[in-house]
Image (spheres, rainbow, N blue to C red):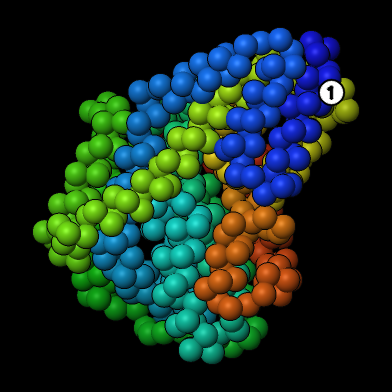
Amino acid sequence: MLTNPNAVWILLGVFFAMVALGVHIAYSVLFASIVTAVHIGLPAATVIQNLVKGINIYSLMAVPFFILAGEIMMQGGITDRLIRLSQALVGWIQGSLAQVNIVACLLFGSISGSSAAGTSAIGGMMIPRMRKDGYDADFATSVTMSSSVECMLIPPSHNMVLFALAAGNVSIARLFLGGIVPGLVLALVLGLYSYYVSRKRNYPKTASFDARLAFSCARESLPGLAAVLIVVVGVIGGFFTATEAAAVSVFYAILVGLFVYREIRFRDLYGIFAKALKTISIVLILTGSSACFSWLIAYLNVPAYVSRIMLSLTESRAVLLLLINLLLIFCGMIMDMAALILITTPILLPIVTNLGMDPIQFCQLLIINLGMGLITPPVGGTLFIGSAISGIGVEKLTRSMLPFYCIMTVALLLITFIPELSLFLPNALMGR
């Protein structure tokens, strides 16, 4: 049973009321936590202590470094090179620009780890070009937004670092490896559907395959993609912690941008650092306030209560997993992704582990669900970015996204019910 049902209702009620009033989710979480703590007789200082404790974690330092490295690489010319590489690899397929979009987002994920950044960077270039080549604007935008979810699965992903913090005692290296195959699965199902639509609508292909051009584009892109190898290989091999690897990737990204690609100058670094700092500050505020919220949730015995309720609904493991997917997609439609990872993980992880699901697999399931929420109304941030870039209304975009939601659900179900998709690489390279 809940230790204090009224306190739970106050916590959730104040939180949703603040969100409805337009208050930023980080402050909504913090204010709801303080009000609830005072209601149950805890000193408000307890909330602040948990806030400080929530961000006073060494491994959390990896998140700002990954965000900064991604920003440097985005400004340093890697996006153009990734698109050229993608075109050289899949430009021979019918509807090639749609395939280029999907592959470019897959590669870009290793740089940014962000759906919004993927849609902005890749979509800003590919959507106008696809429209010029005869693709329907709503289809071009939908492909971009759907593909941007790949960015959050391909390592290194700061969202996986947040999951590791919320879950506790989960290897970041195993999480990184666990996201590779699900990211490829999502790209594959999107690629197959885009090919079907392209054949049906007679979208053109760009050019025949040229191995020499592909090799040249790969060579140009290699310095940027090497940052990913440094992080993943360094963490898996035990050469770096995730935090150290993230710091090294920042240093390497600066060297590539300044001296290899030469598309940023020393005077540009101030603007890049300032832009990254805005994102970093939001993530850290969310992390701290969510730590307060999660502590209160645990104090009020909510995880055990929710677990008991869900397990009482049905004895079917499959039905329970489907219910969890629906819950996560719904939450992703109305709340920020980072906050949801930090809040829902302590509640749902005990449930799925009781069902026999590995935390590595649950992380991939969580991220793809919340990623789908980002491209779904009413509050999907990536959906609004796609609308702004293409100039198409959200209502029309949502209609054009319906088949993509179905296709992404196929990938989600595969990841949910085939554990080896998430666990094969971690187990093969790091042991069980």
Examine the image and state in which quarter residue 312 appears: top right
Of 173 and 126, nearer the camera is: 126
Q: Is 166 situated above or below 321?
A: above
Label 1 crowding class (10 Å Cα cut-off): few <14, some 14-19, many 20+? few
Of 194 and 351, nearer the camera is: 351
Question: Percent x, y for residue 257?
Answer: 19, 58
Examine the image and state in which quarter residue 271 appears: bottom left
Q: How many numbered badges does the structure rendering display?
A: 1
Question: Percent x, y for residue 129?
Answer: 45, 83
Question: Percent x, y for residue 131?
Answer: 52, 85
Question: Percent x, y for residue 127?
Answer: 49, 77
Q: Residue at x 69, y 16 (%)?
A: 38
Of 160 and 300, nearer the camera is: 300
Viewed as shown, does residue 410 lie left or right of 275? right
Examine the image and state in which quarter residue 237 appears: top left
Residue topped by disc 1: 309
Q: Secondary structure at mark 1?
A: helix
Q: Is 269 situated above or below 130?
A: above
Q: Residue at x 66, y 40 (%)?
A: 416
Viewed as shown, does residue 432 lie left or right of 81? right
Viewed as shown, does residue 181 lie left or right of 345? left
Q: Residue at x 78, y 33 (%)?
A: 13
Q: Is residue 112 visible?
A: yes
Viewed as shown, does residue 234 lie left or right of 37? left
Q: Residue at x 23, y 28 (%)?
A: 239
Give the residue furthest to the left. Answer: 259
Q: Is 13 situated above or below 292?
A: below
- Amino acid found under the numbered disc labelled 1: Ile
Q: Is residue 188 visible?
A: no
Q: Quadrant of the N terminus?
A: top right
